[in-house]
Image (tube, rainbow, N blue to C red):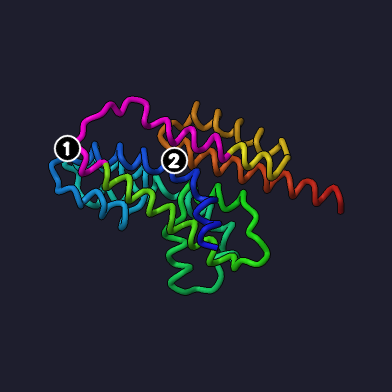
């Protein structure tokens, strides 16, 4: 089971490690000890929010402003969690960690894969989540300790996340084979990007979910 989860999570590794390195390199410019970057990967574990925190810390913002901004940025994860309320099992430490470790990438991966019948679903998801965080912490650590003995050009490294989501999108298409959700997602994203730039992702998710729910209600009423 561990070997299978490791193999399944490799696409996340190829996205998380380069992005983590980029974060570690930028974080070191703030003058903090290198292990602070690793601790952020362990305790905070929020890629976009961690990059945002670099700007906030450099600007001297307080903990309340940082906490509120992080909450609104990651509030989309509340919608992710609804899809796994039953799949994560009973309320215990394992479920709490699965909730904490839910990221865009792990959500996309776990909604795409099919857990083998002889594997425990909760434990399989746990390994995927754990491996994903290990990749991120590893990248943050490498980036944080690199300035002392290594210099390299990081131009274009941020594209790793985009490439990762393209791969996950293809996997979703192979699994679902239904065009409508992708069209709704595309239209919602364009609309949110045009009119709600600062909250684009959250608005796009709300519109997509609302549209799907509305279409299901209409379909149910028509069938009834």
Pick the residue in front: 126 or 176: 126
As drawn, is 122 to the left or to the right of 54? right
Q: In what quadrant of the picture does the C terminus appear?
A: bottom right
What whole-number distance in Å separates the C-alpha atoms at marks 2 and 1? 23 Å
| Pointer 2 or 1: first along the chain | 2
Q: Which residues fall within the magenta stretch?
A: 143-168
Disc 1: which residue: 149
The spot of residue 38 in percent (x, y) is 26, 52
Secondary structure beneath dot 2 equals helix
Q: In what quadrant of the picture does the N terminus appear?
A: bottom right
Quick check: is 178 in the magenta stretch?
A: no
Q: Quadrant of residue 101?
A: bottom left
Residue found at x 36% / y 31%: 157
Label 1: few (<14), some (14–19) or many (≥20) C-alpha neighbours in 10 Å? few
As drawn, is 105 to the left or to the right of 174? left
Residue found at x 53% / y 51%: 7
As drawn, is 99 to the left or to the right of 209? left
The spot of residue 24 in percent (x, y) is 26, 42
Residue, far front: 3
In the rendered view, would you say 144 is above or below 130?
above
Disc 2: which residue: 14
Secondary structure beneath dot 1 equals loop
As drawn, is 197 to the left or to the right of 113? left
Q: Quadrant of residue 115?
A: bottom right
């Amino acid at each position: 089971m561990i070997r299978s989860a490791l193999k399944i999570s490799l696409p996340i590794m190829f996205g998380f490690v380069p992005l983590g390195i980029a974060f570690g390199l930028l974080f070191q410019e703030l003058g903090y000890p290198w292990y602070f970057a690793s601790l952020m990967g362990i305790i905070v574990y929020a890629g976009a929010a961690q990059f945002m925190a670099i700007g906030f810390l450099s600007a001297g913002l307080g903990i309340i402003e940082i906490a509120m901004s992080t909450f609104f940025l990651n509030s989309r994860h509340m919608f992710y969690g609804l899809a796994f309320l039953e799949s994560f099992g009973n309320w215990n430490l394992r479920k709490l960690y699965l909730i904490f470790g839910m990221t865009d990438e792990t959500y996309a991966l776990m909604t795409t894969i099919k857990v083998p019948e002889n594997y425990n679903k909760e434990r399989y998801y746990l390994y995927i989540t754990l491996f994903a965080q290990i990749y991120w912490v590893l990248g943050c650590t490498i980036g944080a300790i690199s300035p002392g003995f290594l210099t390299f050009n990081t131009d274009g490294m941020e594209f790793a996340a985009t490439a990762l989501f393209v791969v996950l999108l293809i996997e979703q298409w192979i699994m679902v084979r239904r065009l409508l959700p992708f069209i709704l997602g595309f239209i919602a994203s364009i609309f949110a990007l045009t009119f709600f730039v600062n909250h684009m992702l959250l608005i796009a998710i709300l519109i997509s979910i609302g549209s799907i729910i509305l279409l299901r209600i209409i379909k149910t009423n028509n069938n009834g």
